[in-house]
Amino acid sequence: MISERHITNTGKCLIIITATFLFLFITSLRVYAQENPPRPPLIAKTFDLAFGAFYHGAAGGTVSVDENDSRSSSGDIVLLGLGYPVSAARFNINSNPGTLINILSIPDFTLSWNSYTMLVEIENSNPSLPFVNNNDYSIPTELSFGARLHVGNSLSNPPGSYSGSFEVTLVIE
């Protein structure tokens, strides 16, 4: 019976020593009340919105470029190749992981050449807005916008190199 008591007391001592060691180890770890402050988001344009070359007749119509660079037309617009670029507007956004990203609504804007103008409407985006950034701050998230160009008849919108601009304002939550 003496040997059984000795093992029991040894087991209790071992438990007390292990618990004391774990307590000292856990209390020596550094604990932070909050993470480092977030870095402000950055946005940079990577590609301009471009509708490419097209021909239009007496009625006019629309030329659309979707967020994946596919182009289509309506009315009497004929899409031409001719090597002119076709591209959705593309931006790189750097933000902290878990950031909810949205944009303010982009109003319609005009493209102009000499005294002639055409109306542009921003359409769908990729990714769809709003979205949560899952990338690390150092890895940009690409955001692209498609658009629709309203083209008048050949008298109100003669061939030319039309240009314009629009602003994208990020809303970060």
Image (cartoon, helix red, strand yellow):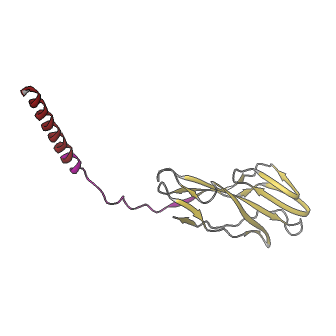
Depth check, front residue: 110 or 146: 146
Picture coordinates of residue 140, whole percent (x, y): 53, 52
Q: Is residue 63 inside the magenta stretch?
A: no
Q: Which residue is the extreme one toward the front?
A: 1
Q: Residue furthest bottom?
A: 115
Instruction: Write down the quadrant of residue 130 in the picture.
Output: bottom right
Residue at the outermost right position: 58
Tell me which corner region of the image, top left, top right, bottom left or bottom right, holds residue 12: top left
Left/right placement of residue 3 relative to residue 75 reads: left
Residue 70 drawn at (x, y percent):
75, 50
The magenta segment is 24-44
Looking at the rendering, which quadrant does residue 59 occupy? bottom right
Residue occupying image coordinates x 12% and y 38%? 13
State the residue at coordinates (12%, 30%). Answer: 7
Tally the numbered discs: 0
Give the main secondary structure, helix, strand or loop, of the magenta stretch: loop
Q: Is residue 30 magenta?
A: yes
In this view, 19 is above or below 131: above
Left or right position of 170 against 49 = left
Quadrant the N terminus occupies: top left
Q: Position of residue 98 (x, y in %)?
A: 49, 55
Q: Position of residue 138 (x, y in %)?
A: 47, 51
Horizontal side of residue 95 vs 167, given as left or right: left
Residue 44 falls left or right of residue 13: right
Residue furthest out toward the left: 2
Write the residue at 70% across / 50% down.
Answer: 68
> Looking at the picture, does residue 67 appear above or below residue 157?
above
